[in-house]
Image: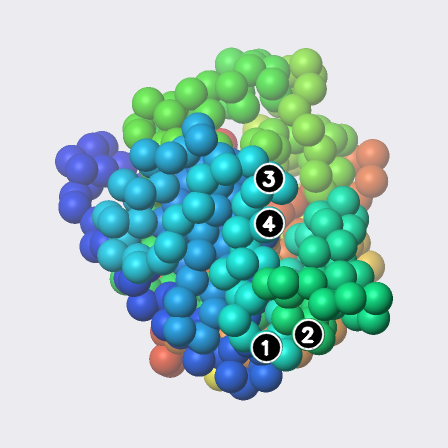
Amino acid sequence: MDTDFSDKSLLTTKLAAPQTDQRIPRLQKVLDELALDAIFVTSPENIFYLTGFTGSAAYLVVGKTASLITTDGRYQDQVEIQLRASGVDAEIFIGSGRGQLESIKNFVSGTGRLRLGFEAGDITWALWEHLVSLFVDASLSGEKEVPGVPEKTELVPTRGVIEKLREVKDQGETERIGKACLIADMALADVKHLLQTEISEKDFAVELEYKMKKLLAQGPAFATIVASGPNSALPHARPTERKMREGDLVVIDFGAKVDGYHSDMTRTYGLGVKDQELLHLAQAVLAAQEAGVRSVKSGVLAGDVDLVCRSVLRENGLEQFFSHGTGHGVGLLIHEAPYLGADSADILASGSVVTVEPGAYLFGKGGVRIEDTMVVTQNACEVLTQTVKEFIC
């Protein structure tokens, strides 16, 4: 029996404010642990996380006692408004791209011997060349002293520093992900009946995304997957003009986005499926997914959740048809730490938000994937995606 999602008033519930003002101080404590004088932040998601600024062009440098955000004239008023609303105390510089980098050099110039971290997974080669020309070539050339440039500057690659801070969500973040999940649940409930109308994969995806926007989502969390019949055996198939028909498996993998935060859910439906091999596939994946969800709690090795799901599929003779990891963290990115794969050494922490999404795919015939988004708690997890996992549609 379907869950009742008719109460749209839930969408207007006031959400807790994210604790943005506490994040730069947390990062500053990490700088000491990493023996860094400052860190240069270029990832848009990390800049938003630390400051609340949503513009498309910005740099942020966080020092041990102060921080600076730079952007261009398009965002002159917006950056002040958003930092003020977030309670973030940072200097602001408005100017050209080159001017912004010069302002960053000036901001850190009083440090002396400088260890400046940068986000190795985000920085472009062109930006790297600019940093080298500003900090390294000038200070280490030995030809002359350059005013405003520390005597010895070391550019230090960092990986996952801010992403690690992002793993555990505060209440405001969790409530936004929960609202995104609710919107996705409501949207699917509104359009699910169309599966019986021989609608095309593309048209169903359009209807689903339209409903999410009507329910106040910023938009879809990612490119919606609707895959029917043999297309369902392709884990990341894109919707086509193929029309759904009797006997098809239909995989629907989608999510909504609210205030920058994502949801992720997959349901697989059988349109009058009678093929015993496909029925066995669906039953085994459901059992694997439910076992995986039961294994999620604080302190669990993420790789062990993958092992739980994989072992159920192995017992059903299907492990070789499970071709991807079991899940991932969800937040400002649809895929972020922690990662629930076979070789993952991540440890699940209370307050992190993850998915569990095992699947099995018989190429040319059909595939099944079932996925929920959940909050990790001390002794279990709270599942945020509430659409029932019935198979027959």
Closer to the observer: label 3 or label 2? 2
Instruction: Determine the CA span between mark 3 and mark 2.
Output: 24 Å
Q: What element carries label 3?
A: helix
Asked if labels 4 and 3 touch by Cβ distance under 8 angstroms, the answer is yes
Secondary element at image label 4: helix
* Image mark for residue 190: none
As helix, strand or loop, the secondary structure at mark 2 comes to loop
| Residue position marked by numbered label 2 in the rendering | 151
Can residue 368 be seen in the rendering of this structure?
Answer: yes
Mark 1 highlights which residue? 112
Image position of 122 with respect to 67: above or below = above
> For the residue carrying disc 1, how many other residues have a C-alpha within 10 Å: few (<14), some (14-19), or many (20+)?
some
In this rendering, the answer to whether 305 lies above or below 321 is below
Image quadrant in which you'd find residue 49: bottom left
**At 44% across and 31% down in the image, what residue appears?**
73
Q: 377 or 87: nearer the eye?
A: 87
The residue carrying mark 3 is 97
Name the disc covering residue 101, or none: 4
Percent across and percent down for residue 20 are 32, 59
> In which quarter of the view is residue 314 placed?
bottom right
